[in-house]
Image (cartoon, rainbow, N blue to C red):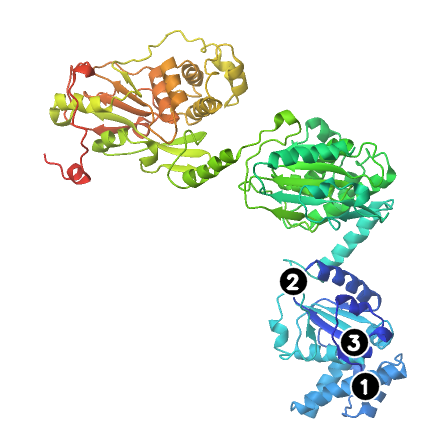
C-alpha cells in the first residue's frame, strides 16, 4: 500500500510519484476558497477528467442489475482472506495488472479488518465487500487501471461523505491515487465519519473564505469552458504583458515619475502602476505636488490624461459608433464587443487591449447581479471611454512606453471602476487621488490595486494643470478649516451660511407657542435637522382667527412683539391686485416643459431679475418654485393654466423680498411675513401664490384674521392641510390696523410651560 502523506503546497498534487518524498499519495478535503484554490481546482479538475474521475453528488448504492451481474461473474461467496480476495478481484476486473491487483487487495484487506475490529460480523463484512467491488467496477474502473502509475490518477468529489463512501476512497487512496473532497458547507459533516481526520487532511491556507454562493463542480466546469472560449477570443498573442506595481517602492508621488525603461528590463513585460491615494499627507503642499507630478510626467514626453470628479458619460455619437447585434450567449456578445477595438495602430498593442478587455468582461460575468443586458451596456460604455481616452494615451505608442491617467475624486460608480481596472492592464499608469476622505472611491476588490491612506483630508475640486490654477492654503487657512470641522460638524453650531440647500416642514403648534417660536432661530426649533449640505427648517404657517379674551390692546401689543426688522407687514388684502402688470406673464409658458422648469432658459431671459443673487439663493428659489408647482398647492394647477401664473408671480417678487432671501441663513433667524385681514376682502390668487412660496422658501407666515372669515383659503386646493388655523378667541369686526410705533409692546418675559398649560380663565 501507498503512504498517505501531507503536501507542502497545492502544486504537490501534480508532482510525479517518483519525485514525491516517500512515494506518498494525497487525500485532502477543501472547505474554503480563495483565488489560489480556484486556480488549483481548475487544473485538478482537468487532470481528473484526463486520468481519473470527477464525481458530482453521492455515489449511488449498487442496484439489482449490478448485484445480479456481480453474482453471475464472481459468485456470492466471501472469505476475509487475501488469496480469496485477490482471486475474486482478478476474475471481476481482468484488465488489472498483477501488481495493481495486489495493491487493491492489500488496501481492501486493511479496510475490512478495521471493520471487523469495530465489531462488524461476517454478513456485514460481506455486504461492504460486495458494495466496494461493485463501486470499483462501475465507478472507478479507469482509476484502478492507472493506480500506482508515475502520473497518479485523480479523484474530485463534491458529494456528502457517508461511512462506506469514505472507506471506498480510503481503499483507492492507499492503493495509489490522489483524492480531493469539496465541502461547500464546511467540515462538520465530514467529521461525523472521521472525527480525528485519520483518513484525509483538511486544507488550511491564509485568506480562505467560504465558497461563493452557487459554487460547484458544474460552475467550475463552466469557468473552464469560459477560459477556453476566452483563449479563442485573444487572437494574436501579444509578446509582452503587464507587470503592475511589482516594481514600485511605495513612495507616493515619486513612483509614477519613474521612467518606464528604469522600472525593469524584462522584455516580456511593460511596467505600470495602479495606485490609489486616500487622504493627504501634507495639506499645504498637496495641490503643488499634483501640479509638479503632471508637469514632470508631461515634461518627460509621456502622454497624460487628467479627469476631474468622474468620467463624463458617453455621448449619443460615441454610443452609436459601437457596432452590436442581439445576443443570447455571453461569448458571442464579448466577441462582437472586442471587434470594436480597432483604433490602435500597432497589432501588439491591440492584442494587449483585447486580452485586458476579454479578461475583465469574463470577470464581470461572475458578479451575482450581472445579466447579459447589463454586461452589454457595461461593455459598450467601456469601449466608448477606451476610444475617447485611448486615442490620446496611446497615440504613436511604442514599447515599452507607459502613458498616465489621473482621476481626481475617485470612481463614482461601477462603470468608472471597471474602466480604470481595464486601463490598469494596459501600458498605462492609473492614478486615483481621493484627497477628500468623506467621498470615498467605490473601486474595490482588484488584486492589482496598491493603496496608500493618509490621516488628513482636503477638499479639492480640480486637478491643477496650470500654475495659475494653484491655490495653496497657508498653515493658518488649513488650521481654520480643521477648527471648522471640530466646531461645526455634528456639534449643533453652524458657520455662517454653512448649508447650501434647505427644505421646510410646517410646525403644528398651540396658539401660545407661536409668539415663543416666532423669535427663535431655526436651529433651536423642534424637528430641525442638518445632514450634509441640506437643512430641514421647521417654519410657521398659521392663521390666527379671533382675538384672545376680546382684549384688543393685548392683541395689538402681542403682534407688535412679532414685528422684527426681518418682518414684512401687509395691512390689507389683497396684497397683489389681480391684473397688475407682470412682464413674465407672457413668458411663463416657455419656461415649463413636461412639468419641469427650464432653469437655464429662465436665467438667460432678459427680464430675469435674480441673477445678482448668490448661486445658492437662485437655486433655492427655482427649486421651491418647482416644488410649489409639483405639489399642486394652488387650485387650478395643471387644470386652467395656473402653473404659468405661479411662475410669473414668483419671478416678479418685490426687491425687498429678494434681499431677504439673499440674506437668509438657513440655520439662524428666518424672515417673517404678517398679513392682516380686517374685513371681507379676500386674498388674490397672486397673494396665495406668493405667501405659499415664501413658506416653502423658509419664511414664517402669520395671517391675523380677527373676524374668523375665510378670506385666505379661496385659492388653496387643501386649505385645511396647507394652513394651520388657531381659534384664538372672540371674533371681532371693524378693527383697524394701528400704527405699531405708537403701540406699547408687551413684556418680553416668556411664559413658562406651566403657565401656558394651566393658564387661568
Q: Which of marks 1 and 2 is in front?
A: 2
User: Looking at the figure, which quarter contains the N terminus?
Assistant: bottom right
**Callout 3–callout 2 Cβ contact below 8 Å:** no
Q: Which residue is drawn at 59% across and 43% down?
A: 281
Percent of width and height locating residue 97: 90, 81
Any part of residue 73 in sight: no
Marks 3 and 2, how far apart at CA: 24 Å
Any part of residue 82 in sight: yes
Q: Classify residue 674 as left or right of residue 551.
A: right
Percent of width and height locating residue 199: 70, 79
Disc count in the image? 3
Q: Which residue is drawn at 43% across and 40% down?
A: 489
Please tell me which of labels 3 and 2 falls first in the chain. Answer: 3
Q: Which mark is residue 25?
A: 3
> Which SS class for mark 2?
loop
Q: In which quarter of the image is residue 746?
A: top left
Percent of width and height locating residue 601: 54, 16
Q: Nearer the viewer, mark 3 or mark 1?
A: 3
**Foreground: 331 or 257?**
257
**Foreground: 289 or 572?**
289
The residue at which mark 1 appears reads as 105
Mark 1, residues whose alpha carbon is within 10 Å: few (<14), some, or many (≥20)? many
Location of residue 700 with respect to 276 vertically, above or below: above
Percent of width and height locating residue 696: 38, 26
**Foreground: 652 or 488?**
488
The residue at which mark 2 appears reads as 208
> Which SS class for mark 3?
strand
Amino acid at each position: 500500500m501507498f503512504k498517505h502523506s501531507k503536501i507542502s503546497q497545492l502544486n504537490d498534487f501534480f508532482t510525479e510519484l517518483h519525485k514525491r518524498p516517500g512515494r506518498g499519495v494525497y487525500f485532502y478535503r477543501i472547505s474554503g476558497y480563495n483565488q489560489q484554490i480556484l486556480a488549483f481546482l481548475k487544473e485538478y479538475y482537468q487532470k481528473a477528467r484526463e486520468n481519473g474521475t470527477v464525481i458530482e453528488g453521492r455515489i449511488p448504492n449498487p442496484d439489482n442489475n449490478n448485484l445480479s451481474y456481480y453474482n453471475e461473474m464472481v459468485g456470492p461467496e466471501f472469505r476475509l482472506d487475501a488469496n480469496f480476495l485477490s482471486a475474486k478481484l482478478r476474475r471481476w476486473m481482468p484488465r488489472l495488472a498483477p501488481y495493481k491487483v495486489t495493491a487493491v487487495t492489500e488496501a481492501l484487506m486493511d479496510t475490512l479488518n478495521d471493520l471487523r475490529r469495530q465489531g462488524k460480523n461476517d454478513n456485514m463484512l460481506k455486504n461492504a465487500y460486495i458494495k466496494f467491488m461493485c463501486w470499483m467496477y462501475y465507478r472507478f474502473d479507469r482509476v484502478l487501471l492507472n493506480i500506482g502509475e508515475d502520473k497518479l490518477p485523480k479523484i474530485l468529489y463534491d458529494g456528502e461523505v457517508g461511512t462506506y463512501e469514505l472507506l471506498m476512497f480510503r481503499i483507492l487512496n492507499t492503493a495509489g491515487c490522489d483524492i480531493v473532497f469539496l465541502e461547500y458547507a464546511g467540515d462538520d459533516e465530514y467529521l461525523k465519519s472521521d472525527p480525528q481526520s485519520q483518513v484525509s487532511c483538511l486544507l488550511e491556507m491564509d485568506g480562505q473564505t467560504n465558497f461563493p454562493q452557487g459554487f460547484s463542480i458544474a460552475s467550475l466546469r463552466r469557468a473552464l469552458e469560459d477560459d477556453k472560449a476566452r483563449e479563442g477570443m485573444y487572437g494574436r498573442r501579444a509578446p509582452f504583458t503587464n507587470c503592475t506595481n511589482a516594481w514600485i517602492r511605495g513612495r507616493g508621488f515619486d513612483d509614477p515619475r519613474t521612467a518606464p525603461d528604469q522600472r525593469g528590463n524584462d522584455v516580456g513585460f511593460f511596467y505600470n502602476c495602479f495606485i490609489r491615494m486616500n487622504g493627504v499627507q501634507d495639506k499645504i503642499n498637496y495641490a503643488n505636488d499634483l501640479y509638479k507630478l503632471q508637469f514632470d510626467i508631461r515634461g518627460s514626453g509621456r502622454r497624460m490624461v487628467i479627469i476631474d470628479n468622474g468620467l463624463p458619460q458617453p455621448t449619443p455619437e460615441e454610443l452609436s459608433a459601437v457596432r452590436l447585434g442581439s445576443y443570447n450567449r455571453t461569448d458571442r456578445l464579448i466577441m462582437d464587443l472586442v471587434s470594436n477595438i480597432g483604433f490602435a495602430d500597432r497589432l501588439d498593442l491591440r492584442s494587449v487591449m483585447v486580452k485586458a478587455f476579454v479578461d475583465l468582461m469574463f470577470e464581470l460575468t461572475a458578479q451575482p447581479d450581472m445579466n447579459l443586458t447589463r454586461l452589454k451596456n457595461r461593455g459598450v460604455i467601456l469601449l466608448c471611454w477606451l476610444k475617447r481616452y485611448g486615442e490620446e494615451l496611446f497615440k504613436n505608442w511604442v514599447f515599452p512606453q507607459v502613458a498616465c491617467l489621473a482621476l481626481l475624486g475617485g470612481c463614482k460608480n461601477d462603470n468608472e471602476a471597471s474602466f480604470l481596472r481595464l486601463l490598469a492592464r494596459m501600458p498605462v499608469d492609473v492614478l486615483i487621488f481621493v484627497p477628500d476622505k468623506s467621498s470615498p472611491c467605490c473601486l474595490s476588490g482588484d488584486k492589482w490595486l496598491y493603496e496608500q491612506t493618509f490621516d488628513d483630508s482636503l477638499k479639492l475640486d480640480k486637478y491643477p494643470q496650470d500654475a495659475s490654477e494653484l491655490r495653496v492654503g497657508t498653515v493658518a487657512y488649513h488650521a481654520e478649516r480643521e477648527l471648522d470641522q471640530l466646531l461645526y460638524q455634528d456639534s449643533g453650531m453652524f458657520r455662517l451660511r454653512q448649508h447650501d440647500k434647505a427644505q421646510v416642514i410646517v410646525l403644528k403648534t398651540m396658539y401660545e407657542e407661536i409668539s415663543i417660536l416666532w423669535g427663535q432661530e431655526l436651529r433651536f426649533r423642534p424637528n430641525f435637522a442638518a445632514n450634509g449640505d441640506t437643512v430641514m427648517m421647521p417654519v410657521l404657517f398659521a392663521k390666527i382667527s379671533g382675538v384672545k379674551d376680546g382684549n384688543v390692546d393685548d392683541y395689538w401689543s402681542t403682534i407688535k412683539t412679532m414685528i422684527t426688522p426681518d418682518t414684512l407687514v401687509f395691512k390689507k388684502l389683497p396684497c397683489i391686485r389681480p391684473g397688475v402688470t407682470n412682464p413674465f406673464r407672457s413668458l411663463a409658458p416657455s419656461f415649463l416643459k413636461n412639468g419641469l422648469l427650464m432653469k437655464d432658459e429662465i436665467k438667460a431671459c432678459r427680464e430675469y431679475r435674480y441673477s445678482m443673487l448668490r448661486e445658492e439663493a437662485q437655486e433655492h428659489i427655482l427649486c421651491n418654485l418647482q416644488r410649489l408647482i409639483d405639489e399642486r398647492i394652488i387650485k387650478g394647477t395643471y387644470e386652467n393654466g395656473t402653473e404659468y401664473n405661479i411662475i410669473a408671480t414668483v419671478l416678479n417678487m418685490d426687491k425687498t423680498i429678494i434681499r431677504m432671501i439673499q440674506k437668509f441663513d438657513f440655520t439662524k433667524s428666518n424672515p417673517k411675513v404678517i398679513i392682516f385681514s380686517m374685513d371681507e376682502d379676500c386674498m388674490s390668487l397672486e397673494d396665495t401664490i406668493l405667501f405659499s412660496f415664501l413658506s416653502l422658501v423658509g419664511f414664517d407666515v402669520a395671517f391675523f384674521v380677527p373676524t374668523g372669515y375665510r378670506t385666505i383659503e379661496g385659492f388653496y386646493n387643501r386649505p385645511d392641510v396647507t394652513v394651520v388655523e388657531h381659534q384664538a378667541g372672540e371674533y371681532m369686526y371693524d378693527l383697524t390696523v394701528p400704527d405699531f410705533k405708537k403701540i406699547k409692546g408687551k413684556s418680553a418675559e416668556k411664559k413658562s410651560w406651566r403657565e401656558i398649560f394651566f393658564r387661568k380663565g
